[in-house]
Amino acid sequence: MPRVPIRLGLDYNSRMPRDSKIKISLRPATPADAEAAAALMYETMPTLGEYLFGQPDAAGTIRVLAGIFPAPGHLLSYQYSTLATFGMEAVGIAQVLPSNDMARAAIGLARALRRRFGWAAMLRLIYRGIRLANEPDTEPGEYYVNTLAVAPAWRNQGIGARLLEEAERRGRELGLSVLSLGVLLHNTNAKRFYERVGFREALKYETRPLAPGVKYTGFYRMVKPIDRTDRKSK
């Protein structure tokens, strides 16, 4: 079964002034967070998500994401998700998993789609994701950031960095030594952000467009060594 990674496509342009007094909390996501999480996840995959899931617009793609989010054991599941919240509002999400679990989680994604939306939806995802399945986005033994998204109105508040710090902490607990992710080639803002928080470019992968209207021509594979010292213990 092919692996169907969802690429990052974030734009970290600020739409509100930075306020260091804002109190953001991090917590594990639950199935009840499906609608809020789906809207955040869509920020990373607009035209790509519509292509993979066969939806005509944002509303359709978000509906699919919300429908499969409560199922465990797949790439876009609540099980791998951490939410950043301000009060009761979800303002950011990270979906991170060991790279060694990626193949199993991709199979889980296809199964979750079949159970919720039927065989046609699953087969479409597999057929359209075959090219993505063979791309060199991660290597064994890494902690892979499959999704990182911050709500547009909350960008430039340090929320993305907080979520990555939490991912690094969990990776350290798992005994992993590298945090990795992919950034779409056209997303220069996101690439600069990741470089600022310690990631470096390990590979530039270019490919022909997937389909007309799909904004995807490849990605940068980026990696960051996981700090073996837990700063909270200092």
Image: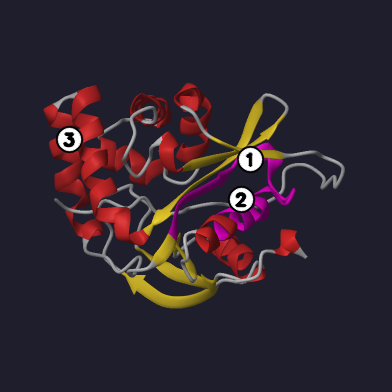
Magenta stretch encompasses residue 212: no
What label does residue 152 carry, if any? 1
Q: Nearer the viewer, mark 3 or mark 2?
A: 2
Task: Name which quarter of the figure residue 84 lies in.
Answer: top right
Q: Earlier in the sequence, mark 1 or mark 2?
A: 1
Q: Residue 184 placed where, x, y %?
A: 44, 60
> Which residue is labeled 2 in the image?
163
Classify 183 as above or below 27: below
Stretch in magenta: 144-168
To which quarter of the image does residue 78 belong? top left
As drawn, the label of residue 122 is 3
Which numbered marker is on residue 27?
Answer: none
Report the amino acid beneath label 2. Answer: Leu
Q: Position of residue 114 (x, y in %)?
A: 18, 29
Q: Secondary structure at mark 1?
A: helix
Q: Amino acid at mark 1?
A: Pro
Which residue type does callout 3 highlight? Met
Question: Could you give the CA–CA distance between mark 3 and mark 2, rounded to whole angstroms?
Answer: 30 Å
Question: Dot 1: within a 10 Å radius of its alpha carbon, few (fewer than 14), some, or many (20 or more) residues?
Answer: some
Residue at the (54%, 55%) spot, across then down:
170
Q: Is residue 204 left or right of residue 128?
A: right
Q: Residue at x 41, y 25 (%)?
A: 59
